[in-house]
Image (cartoon, rainbow, N blue to C red):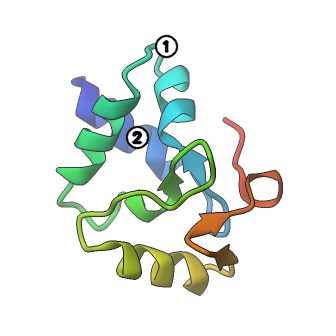
Amino acid sequence: MGFSERVYNATKKIPKGKVSTYKDIAKMLNCKAYRAVGNALNNNCSKDVPCHRVIKSNGFVGGFNHGIKKKILLLKKEKIKVKNSRVNLVKYLFKF
């Protein structure tokens, strides 16, 4: 299984109403390639992979293939509060 597929499988484990970070996904995969995680998610074409649930480790929403506004909208649909483009990690962070 390639790196991107491993990233997608990890991302699929994040439940609705929770988020994870690029860094935490990289750690779960036993690597430090945080940016590579972001690149893999940016290149994802499958709607089965909830890329919008992956944010920066400082709580900021970060990038999204369909735009940041769309990412924030998807998070809000899952009852995740986003204030000033930031998510409260204490409340919403999913632990692998």
Work out whether residue 62 or residue 78 is closer to the camera in this orientation and state it. 62
Label disc, if present, on residue 48 of the rendered structure = none
The residue singled out by tag 1 in the image is: 30
Going 35% across and 59% down the picture, which residue do you hit? 63
Going 37% across and 21% down the picture, which residue do you hit? 33
Placement of the C terminus among the 4 image quadrants: top right
Extreme residue toward the right, this view: 90
Circle 1 residues within 10 Å: few <14, some 14–19, many ≥20: few
The residue singled out by tag 2 in the image is: 9
Q: Determine the CA span between mark 1 and mark 2.
A: 14 Å
Contact flag, marks 1 and 2 (Cβ < 8 Å):
no
From what the image shows, is residue 90 above or below residue 40?
A: below
Quarter location, residue 67: bottom left
Left or right of residue 18: residue 54:
left
From what the image shows, is residue 15 above or below residue 47?
A: above
Left or right of residue 12: residue 88:
right
Going 26% across and 25% down the picture, which residue do you hit? 3
First in sequence: mark 1 vs mark 2: 2
Left or right of residue 44: residue 85:
right
Position of residue 10 measured from the top left corner of the image (x, y, whole percent): 47, 39
Disc 1 versus disc 2: nearer the observer: 1
From what the image shows, is residue 65 above or below residue 55?
A: below
Going 46% across and 47% down the picture, which residue do you hit? 11
Position of residue 34 measured from the top left corner of the image (x, y, whole percent): 40, 29
Helix, strand or loop status at disc 2? helix
Helix, strand or loop status at disc 1? loop
From what the image shows, is residue 25 above or below residue 18?
A: above
Quarter location, residue 47: bottom left
Placement of the N terminus among the 4 image quadrants: top left
- The three-letter code of the residue at mark 2 reads Asn
- The three-letter code of the residue at mark 1 reads Asn
Position of residue 56 measured from the top left corner of the image (x, y, whole percent): 52, 47
